[in-house]
Image (cartoon, helix red, strand yellow):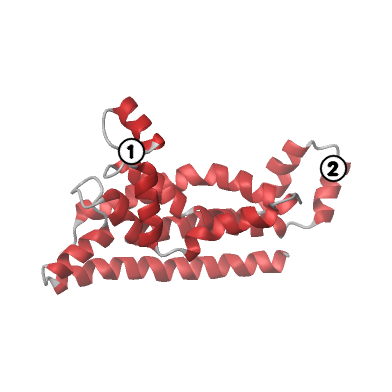
Amino acid sequence: MMDWTALGVSVRLALVTVAVLLPGGVWLGHLLAMRQFRGKGFVEALIAVPLILPPTVLGFYLLVTLGSRSVVGSAFEAMAGQALVFSFPGLVLASVIANIPFVVQPIQRGFEAVPNDVREAAACCGLSPVQRFARVELPLAWPGVLTAAILAFAHTLGEFGVVLMVGGNIPAETRTLSIAIYDRMQAFDDRSAGVMAAVLLVAAVATLGATTMLGRRVMRRA
């Protein structure tokens, strides 16, 4: 049967991850789309690293970085009174890092698709850079921003390796739907695992359909 608690943890994790990532992703995506600077290729490659690394490898490095012996982990433990790893805040931080490319890259492509003559016309009308961004560029780049939100949400729902390494399997706190599926298979409960896997499958198909539609809109605009 469906593990509703695990589903709730997954949805909450996905929503928080998207909310944390989008503001910084919009800023960084706009910067990479509009500016040419030394080391830009290195920055873009660094952003794409979570796409290349196996999730367990990324989870291992995050576990070391966020552990109690690290600067980040010890500082959090001193302030919050609990360890950062194997907690929901630590899981959110790990999820944010793992989803950076899923947010930044679509937003960057969205801003790159905005025609330069539109920006020039806005500048000729006397709009400041901030006004051009808020009134012209961001509204035109919305398919990229929406694609980023959808991808990050869906990817977080189905993430397994990073969640297991950093969050563990604590019921009602870090046990997500993907971990629940693994547990059900370990217990030879194929029926419950199948029901939960179907939920993730539907989410994946819906994500692919939405991103394909939005990607075509961006290409037409470009």
Q: Can you say whether 82 is above or below 210 in the image?
A: above
Residue 159 visible at all: no
Q: Check the image and name the residue furthest to the right.
A: 124
For disc 1, the neighbor class at 10 Å (few under 14, some 14 to 19, many from 20) is: few
Circles 1 and 2, Cβ within 8 Å, touching? The answer is: no
Q: On the picture, is 49 further left or further right than 194?
A: right
Residue 119 visible at all: yes
**69 or 14, which is in the foreground?**
69
**16 or 41, which is in the foreground?**
41
Q: Check the image and name the residue furthest to the top.
A: 79
CA distance separating discs 1 and 2: 51 Å
Q: Which mark is residue 69?
A: 1
Quarter of the image with the C terminus in it: bottom right
Quarter of the image with the N terminus in it: bottom left
The picture places residue 105, in percent across and down from the top left corner, at: 59, 58
Report which residue position mark 2 lands on: 123
Tell me which residue sits at (69%, 53%) in the image: 40
The picture places residue 157, in percent across and down from the top left corner, at: 35, 58
**Nearest to N terminus: mark 1 or mark 2:** 1
Kind of residue indicated by mark 1: Arg
Tell me which residue sits at (46%, 48%) in the image: 18
The picture places residue 219, in percent across and down from the top left corner, at: 68, 68
Kind of residue indicated by mark 2: Ala
The picture places residue 12, in percent across and down from the top left corner, at: 33, 47
Determine the image quadrant of residue 27: top right
Tell me which residue sits at (46%, 54%) in the image: 99
Q: Which mark is residue 30?
A: none
Q: Check the image and name the residue furthest to the front.
A: 69
Tell me which residue sits at (35%, 56%) in the image: 162
Q: On the picture, is 217 further left or further right than 161?
A: right
Determine the image quadrant of residue 92: top left
For disc 2, the neighbor class at 10 Å (few under 14, some 14 to 19, many from 20) is: some
